[in-house]
């Protein structure tokens, strides 16, 4: 058992505007606990919640200032937690802070750069890397992704997410068993066997979350998201299974209702958020007070789900995200206060071990059988049914190993079943008789054994003498062989020079590096996973296709509008940038693949050359009656060092290629997400334009295509009306994408969106092209499938 208080860390987000001096300072004296001091400017201190203090000091395990990058955060905060999860303990990392303070950036990552990937993708990468290294256990990994919004739980990985509105999806509910363990009904667990599979699930969940979001309910800031990695491990042959869960939690913005200053629907949400975080706070207060018997976990869904993480069986870490700008100081102070209370909570993490019921059943069955046998013997009951084939086979195997066992103490354990005891005697008797019949053979075999020692040697000498006599003949034969080998070597060299390309594309298995057996093993173990990688890529693109598929059939006018919308959208820069980076990475991967293949064929040739030299030397030694030198000559040494160098080069390039592959996959997922977001925003904008046209004039109006997405309060209101008229929850437009776009006059570039958009019914537009094409061809890793990656480990 590991007793530990919840670890608290602070992370300060870089300010949007230039750094405002003097607002905070970090004291990280090595001997002291690091502390963060927030200094209130005089003007603010006067009005700050009945309190005129001018500076506040808070202690944290560590404080990460603005320049701390994602790698540092992962190494210092998440890696130790992931390590204990691998050891079998539960772990939780949650980010707490006001909206915009960097919770999502910290937990999931930035939407633009690969280097901005957050704790979740890095942890997945780390965990899968460790699992691959540890062959002493069998591991299984599952992923779940839960969103809690307005006290309702939604499964972000539910495949129905993309087709239904949130309200139609089955809610995730909490069930409690008699042992007070929490179970989540309707939350699916998805097995992930590789990092890529897990990463795909993360992006799928994030995209689902984005699709469900409407401008009216910015769910991402008002909902809690819990990404959970479920890890089970078992040693081969053992009945004990270890289960560990790692929750990575992105909480809703912690800002207070008063500050959000909104009415109606939004207020309800804000209230819920605060209610939910309020209950979290209550649980934390209760836990930090000694001798409190009742902890109000049940008050909210989130505290129920995180029950183990708070004051229970879990190693928990909190990251307080802070946006230390003047206008955010009060929120930052309450975030820090919350963290101080959290730091008082003690958790007791235990290994979650469980006996595998199947193995227990097997053991119990065996025990029952033994007891039955014993009982039968004691009561003298005769068992008449014959032993089965399998039982007989098992017995004979036992007898053989008993006879072979040199240990005089060894016993023949057949249990208390008289039939088995009798069969053993019977079998032994048979063996003994067989030996007697072959009585002569005993002598014979004994002498044969001796033959192996002495007389055989005699014979060998004779043979060798004969061989010596035939030496001349053999020399002739070997000289001929040498000639042939020389010719072969020349041919091989000639071939190598002639066409490396052909060699590269040949279907022959790659040369195993180093130990040939090892090479073979590597190949065997990696082959299926490579195949799977590509199938995952396929799955991912089909997922995206499904998502965009409902929008892909657009009218020509709508497409044009979309082109302009896309061009002027801020995200298009990111998409283009990422496309560029992706192209670069892709060509780097391609070049690397080629170099790898070259290195591989070079290795093959060098090996061949060394072998040839050996043969030549042996032949030469025989022909000139010289002993073959034991040490390799200079030329061979040179070849060997070249070979080693080439192998090193190969391994370096291969490691880089593997890393590139993960980066390419991540960038593609980022782009996919950005594309879905762009389309979603376009649909909202289009619907809004449609409403405006309907309201303003029944006639065809010319549109300002380049209108930015920023909404005026009027248009927002109108859209809100449209959305709420359309569906009770207001999710329909985004979730279903029920847009319909009509072209009135393409030539005049006047576009009239119909008031009831529905891309589903856009089959009439024969000229429409899939949206995907308009983003440019999607790069696919499969394109380099003819290169090293799919042939090699
Ligand atoms: P939250 O989830 O707390 O509402 P986000 O993670 O969405 O906040 O962050 C808001 C914005 O600030 C995003 O554009 C994000 O990329 C950026 N951001 C947050 N933290 C950092 C950081 N440490 N470095 C750079 N940009 C950051
Ligand atoms: Mg967020």
Image (cartoon, rainbow, N blue to C red):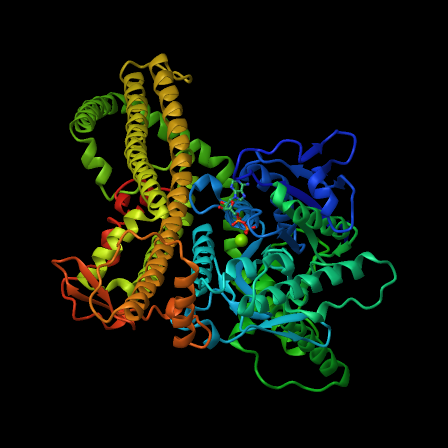
> Observer-nearest residue: 443 or 301?
301
Q: Position of residue 774 (x, y in %)?
A: 23, 52
> Observer-nearest residue: 655 or 690?
690
Work out whether 57 lies above or below 737. above
Is residue 21 toward the left or the right of residue 511 in the image? right
> Could one spot residue 152 in this view of the protein?
yes
Q: Residue at x 39, y 39 (%)?
A: 660
> Observer-nearest residue: 713 or 316?
713
Q: Residue at x 33, y 14 (%)?
A: 635
Q: Position of residue 485 (x, y in %)?
A: 22, 26
Report which quarter residue 351 is drawn in. Answer: bottom right
Q: Position of residue 610 (x, y in %)?
A: 32, 24
Is residue 285 toward the left or the right of residue 636 in the image? right
> Could one spot residue 312 in this view of the protein?
no
Q: How many numbered discs?
A: 0
The quarter in which the N terminus is drawn is bottom right
Residue occupying the far right of the picture? 291
Work out whether 142 lies above or below 457. below
Q: Position of residue 14 (x, y in %)?
A: 56, 38
Report which quarter residue 244 is drawn in. Answer: bottom right
Q: Residue at x 57, y 78 (%)?
A: 387
Q: Residue at x 33, y 62 (%)?
A: 683
Work out whether 176 lies above or below 94. below
Residue occupying the far front of the picture? 696
The quarter in which the C terminus is drawn is top left
Report which quarter residue 258 is drawn in. Answer: bottom right
């Amino acid at each position: 058992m590991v007793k530990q208080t919840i670890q608290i860390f602070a992370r300060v987000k870089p300010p949007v505007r230039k750094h405002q001096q003097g607002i905070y300072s970090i004291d990280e004296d090595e001997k002291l606990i690091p502390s963060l001091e927030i200094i209130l400017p005089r003007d603010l201190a006067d009005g700050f919640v009945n309190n005129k203090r001018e500076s506040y000091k808070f202690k944290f395990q560590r404080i990460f200032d603005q320049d701390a990058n994602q790698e540092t955060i992962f190494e210092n905060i998440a890696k130790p937690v992931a390590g204990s999860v691998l050891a079998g303990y539960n772990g939780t990392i949650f980010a707490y802070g006001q909206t915009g303070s960097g919770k999502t950036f910290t937990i999931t990552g930035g939407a633009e750069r690969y280097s901005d990937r957050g704790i979740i993708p890095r942890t997945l990468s780390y965990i899968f890397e460790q699992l691959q290294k540890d062959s002493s256990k069998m591991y299984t990994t599952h992923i779940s992704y839960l969103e809690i919004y307005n006290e309702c739980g939604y499964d972000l990985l539910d495949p129905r997410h993309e087709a239904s509105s949130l309200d139609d999806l089955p809610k995730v509910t909490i069930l409690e068993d008699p042992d007070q363990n929490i179970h989540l009904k309707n939350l699916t667990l998805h097995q992930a066997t590789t990092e890529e599979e897990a990463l795909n699930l993360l992006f799928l969940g994030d995209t689902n979350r984005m699709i469900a979001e409407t401008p009216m309910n910015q769910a991402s800031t008002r909902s809690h998201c819990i990404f959970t990695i479920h890890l089970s491990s078992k040693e081969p042959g053992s009945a004990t299974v270890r289960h560990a869960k790692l929750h990575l939690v992105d909480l809703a913005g912690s800002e207070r209702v008063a500050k959000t200053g909104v009415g109606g629907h939004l207020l309800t949400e804000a209230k819920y958020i605060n209610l939910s975080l309020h209950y979290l706070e209550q649980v934390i207060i209760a836990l930090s007070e000694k001798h409190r018997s009742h902890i109000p976990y049940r008050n909210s869904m989130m505290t129920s789900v995180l029950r183990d993480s708070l004051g229970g069986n879990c190693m928990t870490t909190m990251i307080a995200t802070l946006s230390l700008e003047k206008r955010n100081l009060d929120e930052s102070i309450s975030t820090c206060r919350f963290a101080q209370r959290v730091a008082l909570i003690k958790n007791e993490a235990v290994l979650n071990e469980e006996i595998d019921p199947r193995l227990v059943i097997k053991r119990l069955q065996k025990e029952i059988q033994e007891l039955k046998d014993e009982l039968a013997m004691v009561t003298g009951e005769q068992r008449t049914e014959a032993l089965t084939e399998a039982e007989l086979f098992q017995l004979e195997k036992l007898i053989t190993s008993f006879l072979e066992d040199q240990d005089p103490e060894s016993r023949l354990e057949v249990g208390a079943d008289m039939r088995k005891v009798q069969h053993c005697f019977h079998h032994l008797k048979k063996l003994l008789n067989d030996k007697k019949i072959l009585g002569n053979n005993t002598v014979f075999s004994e002498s044969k054994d001796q033959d192996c020692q002495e007389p055989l040697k005699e014979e060998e000498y004779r043979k060798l003498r004969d061989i010596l006599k035939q030496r001349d003949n053999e020399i002739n034969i070997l000289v001929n062989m040498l000639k042939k080998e020389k010719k072969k070597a020349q041919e091989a060299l000639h071939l190598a020079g002639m066409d490396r390309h052909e060699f590269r594309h040949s279907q022959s298995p790659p040369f195993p590096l180093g130990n040939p057996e090892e090479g073979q093993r590597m190949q065997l173990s990696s082959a299926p996973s490579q195949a799977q990688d590509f199938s995952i890529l396929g799955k991912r693109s089909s997922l995206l296709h499904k998502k965009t598929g409902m929008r892909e059939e657009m009218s020509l006018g709508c497409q044009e509008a979309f082109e302009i919308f896309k061009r002027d959208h801020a995200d298009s820069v990111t998409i283009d940038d990422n496309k560029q980076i992706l192209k670069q990475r892709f060509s780097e991967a391609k070049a690397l693949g080629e170099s790898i293949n070259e290195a591989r064929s070079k290795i093959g040739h060098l090996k061949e050359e060394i072998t040839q030299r050996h043969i030549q030397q042996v032949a030469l030694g025989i022909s000139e009656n010289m002993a073959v030198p034991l040490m390799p000559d200079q030329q061979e040494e040179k070849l060997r060092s070249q070979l080693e160098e080439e192998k090193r080069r190969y391994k370096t390039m291969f490691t880089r290629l593997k890393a590139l592959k993960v980066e390419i996959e991540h960038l593609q997922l980022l782009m996919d997400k950005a594309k879905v977001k762009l389309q979603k925003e376009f649909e909202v904008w289009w619907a809004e334009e449609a409403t405006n046209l309907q309201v303003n004039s029944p006639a065809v109006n010319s549109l300002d295509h380049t209108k930015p997405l920023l909404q005026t309060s009027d248009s927002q209101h109108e859209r809100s009306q449209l959305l709420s008229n359309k569906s009770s929850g207001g999710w329909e437009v985004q979730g279903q994408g029920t847009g319909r776009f009509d072209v009135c006059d393409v030539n005049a570039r006047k576009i009239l969106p119909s008031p009831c958009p529905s891309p589903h019914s856009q089959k009439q537009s024969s000229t429409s092209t899939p949206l995907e094409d308009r983003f440019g061809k999607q790069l696919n890793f499969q394109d380099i499938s003819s290169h090293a990656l799919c042939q090699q480990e």
